[in-house]
Amino acid sequence: MSATRTLDGRPVADALLAIARRSSDSGTRGGLRRPSLVSVHRATTSPFAFYLKQQARNAEGAGVAFREEPLAASATSDTLRRHLSELDADPAVDAVLLEHPLPAEYDFRGAVRALRAEKDVDGASTENLGRLVQGIPTQAPAVALGAMALLRHYGYDVAGRRVTVIGRSETVGMPLALLLLARAEGANATVTVAHSRSGDLHRGLEGAEFVLSCAGRPGLLTREIVPKGATVVDIGLSSVPDPSKPGGQRAAGDADLASLDGWASAVTPTPGGTGPVTVAQLMLNAVHAWELLHPPGGP
């Protein structure tokens, strides 16, 4: 077959940011302040610092007021929950992102329940996940929405097509499967969900025309298990040793790009694939929260 197509995430991200910016500019011309997003986090590692930098840069491009709030080392689950409750009550804050995963001593699920559905910008709360199951989402995870946006941007229609999602986390894999299954334009796929207990992964991928992987296992996807001609959307992100890179680490996805070259019909690279799209979609979610909290004709 011909060379594998590279699905660059940057033009997709630019398109999403342009949508967010138009909405933000339109609202401010109507007298509203800019949308606002607060990113609450505990991570201090250099990869996470890069992620925060990307949030700040994308927020500026989208016309979103952004600030980060690192948790103190002494913060408890109760402290975190109270702080999110304060942000939920703050009329100057439209969207709150609680970064995850958190250390084991924190109750992530309990903390995000302190946020109303509109302000839970990454769709992680029980209410938002439940609404997603019902097909009436208020907010959905940016990484899942971003993957769908990437497919749309490149003209892929998954309706009636066989799609395998690798991963079943509540914040990525399951929401993505639900979005693909939804009775909605750009969805209506036939979905298989594979995971760490699936056994023979090759069998789970048999016949798949699209493979969307969020396993976080570098090099997992090779031509030995990916059906020939499949389109691969690589959402997995890991750090692997690389002495040539600053800090001795580099980002790696689930796809073995060398193995899939000339085998898969298309694949997203890492970095530069789904990562930029996720951050841009997060900004669009923040603008969506702002629009929900300030409907036309409202106070």
Image (spheres, rainbow, N blue to C red):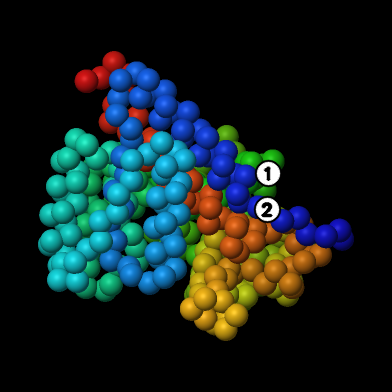
- Residue 25 sits above or below residue 55 on the image: above
| Residue at image coords 33%, 35% | 35
- Secondary structure of residue under mark 2: loop
Relative placement, left or right, of 222 versus 124 is: right
The amino acid at mark 1 is Tyr
Relative placement, left or right, of 97 versus 196 is: left
Residue 7, numbered circle: 2
Asked if residue 189 can be seen in this view, the reply is no
- Secondary structure of residue under mark 1: loop
| Residue at image coords 40%, 30% | 24
| Residue at image coords 19%, 66% | 72
Within the image, what quadrant is residue 136 found in?
A: top left
Residue 154, numbered circle: 1
Which quadrant of the rendered structure holds the C terminus? top left
Tell me the crowding category of disc 2: few under 14, some 14 to 19, or many 20 or more residues within 10 angstroms, Cα based: many
| Residue at image coords 87%, 60% | 1
Q: Does the residue at mark 1 contact the one at mark 2 (Cβ under 8 Å)?
A: yes
Asked if residue 287 can be seen in this view, the reply is yes
The amino acid at mark 2 is Leu
- Residue 153 sits above or below residue 228 on the image: above
Viewer-proximal residue among 10 and 7:
10
Position of residue 189 measured from the top left corner of the image (x, y, whole percent): 60, 46
Position of residue 31 measured from the top left corner of the image (x, y, whole percent): 30, 20
Within the image, what quadrant is residue 77 found in?
A: bottom left
Position of residue 12 measured from the top left corner of the image (x, y, whole percent): 60, 44
